[in-house]
Image (spheres, grey):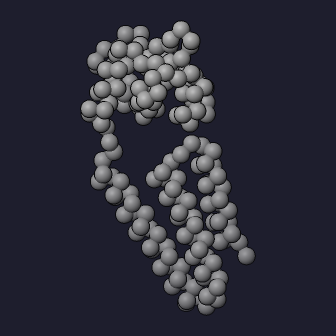
Amino acid sequence: MSQGIASLHKILKDETRRKIILKLNEKTSLTYTDLMESLEIVSTGTLNYHLKILGDLIKKNDSGKYLLSEKGQLAYRILTEFPNGEPQATDKRIFKAWILLFTATVTITGINGYYTNIPMLRTALILAIEILSFGFAFYIRIRPSHSGNRAFFVAVGLWALASCSGS
């Protein structure tokens, strides 16, 4: 599969493919399994798809390890010389929205506990559960990780919310 300059952008705009190129440059050559583990990809289908899209940017050596071709090394240089970082304004807006939502929730819970005469210990428990839930949700949204960790944090967050609404 011949890769022209026009299609290079489409290939490199995916984060997983960028990581594959960066990882292969860092380690020189990797087996399929090592590549899968280092990128924390859990599905062989996903890795196969990205390797197919990368086409002649990567190649296999005689021992079956993946490495960058000359075009792949050029792609690596493009990635490092023209980094595609996330815009800071977007991150700041998301962070500010989370802070605002968290502050409003804690304030409303405190006021509600005061006016409905909920015991202070119960209000503190509800606030602690809300803080944990926001922490887990923030971690999942801002710092996503592979699906195993994400499922754990979702389960703990749901448990915290269920505890808050129960009894």
Q: Is residue 73 left or right of residue 23?
A: left
Is residue 91 positioned above or below 72 on the image?
A: below
Image spot of residue 74 (x, y percent)? 31, 20
Image spot of residue 43 (x, y percent)? 61, 30
Q: Is residue 13 left or right of residue 126?
A: left
Instruction: Name the residue at 59% across, 74% down.
Output: 128
Q: Is residue 97 left or right of residue 144?
A: left
Instruction: Name the residue at 63% across, 45% down.
Output: 148
Is residue 49 positioned above or below 18 on the image?
A: above
Mark yes or no: residue 68 visible: yes
| Residue farthest to the left, as pictured | 81
Image spot of residue 84 (x, y percent)? 31, 37
Quarter placement of the N terminus: top left
Between 116 and 164, the residue placed more toward the observer is 164
Image spot of residue 39 (x, y percent)? 52, 34
Instruction: Name the residue at 59% across, 49% down.
Output: 150
Is residue 157 positioned above or below 87 on the image?
A: below
Q: Is residue 68 left or right of residue 139?
A: left
Instruction: Name the residue at 37% across, 63% down.
Output: 96
Task: Give the total number of marks visible in the rendering.
Answer: 0
Quarter placement of the C terminus: bottom right
Between 38 and 139, the residue placed more toward the observer is 38
**Corner quadrant of residue 122:** bottom right
Mark yes or no: residue 10 visible: no
